[in-house]
Amino acid sequence: ASGEAAAGEAGAPSAAAAAPAPSPEQDDPAAALGIPELARLATRFGCTQTEILRAAEIDPSVVAELPEDMRSTVVMATVSQTNLDHLRRPRPDPPDAGGGGNALEAAAGAGDIDAAVLEALPPDIREEVLREEEARRREQQAAAQRAAAAAQSSNGGSGEMDNASFIASLDPMLREEVLMTAPDELLQTLPAELVAEAQLIQSRNFPRYAVHRDAPRQPQTPPRVVAARAPPPGPRQHPHLQAMEQQLLLQPPAPGQGRAWAAPQGFSRRQHGFPMNDQVLAQLG
């Protein structure tokens, strides 16, 4: 009995030693998918591959149904669009023999994509993601430059009326004349709608516009004002003579005397300067 007890005591450590250690697949079921890029990403973040798939809302059982050559592409394309910062755990970075990690960090430094995610991506997907990120960054820079230019132009033009406001304040006829004869350097400072209006006016009045454009600029002089001359006055009768003539014409002739003088047909006394006859002149002395 004592021998059996001793044998049992001796066999207990060996049974404990023979108990299998938990495999990585038991701690991390997603490791069984065999995706090297996902494994490297989990190592960089200090988390499990299952945690990464859970953050990206990927079901490991669905990935397991995919062909092995498609798993990496499908999984990493979704992971690259997921924010994994909450999974990052502080840990010393392993030495980088090739120096590729620093290049990826520099490429992703200005964007929202983590360098570890880029490093874990397949090469073709990584290049596509970097191209999209570069295009997005350029668009943001262009928008910022346009906003800065608009703010500068609004601040610089606050003290005086700009060209567009000046043209908008003109009456329609003068506005059309200004736009028809506007040079190219002026059109470059106008908004697109004014440029289109100027081109329409110039095409509609092309011969006139060509004359204005090709003719040399002459200094403008104020128009001469010429006073209209009144016609020279004709011979005027004295007012006293006019009154006497009217009075004698209304006075009836004396008996037996008849008319002292009869004007021939078509003869005008006023026109020929003989308004009165000899009798009138004799009475005037």
Image (cartoon, helix red, strand yellow):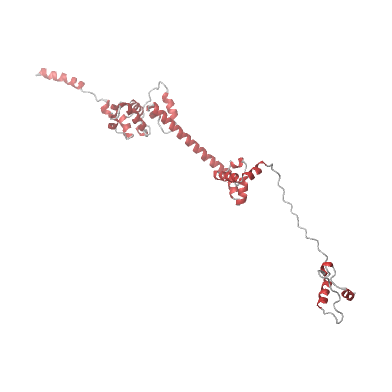
- Report the front residue among 28 and 17: 28
Measuring from the top left, give residue 221's x and y in whole percent: 72, 48
- Residue 261's image quarter? bottom right
- Report the front residue among 240 and 106: 240
Outermost residue on the bottom side: it is 255
- Residue 28's image quarter? top left
Measuring from the top left, give residue 229's x and y in whole percent: 77, 58
Measuring from the top left, give residue 37's x and y in whole percent: 35, 26
Residue drawn at point x = 11 percent, y = 18 percent: 4
Residue drawn at point x = 15 percent, y = 20 percent: 9
- Report the front residue among 96 and 8: 96
Measuring from the top left, give residue 44's x and y in whole percent: 36, 27
Q: Is residue 38 left or right of residue 105?
A: left
Q: Is residue 55 above or below residue 193?
A: above
Q: In this view, does 285 lie above or below 158?
A: below
Q: Is residue 194 above or below residue 12?
A: below
Q: Image quadrant for the C terminus?
A: bottom right
Q: Is residue 220 left or right of residue 185?
A: right
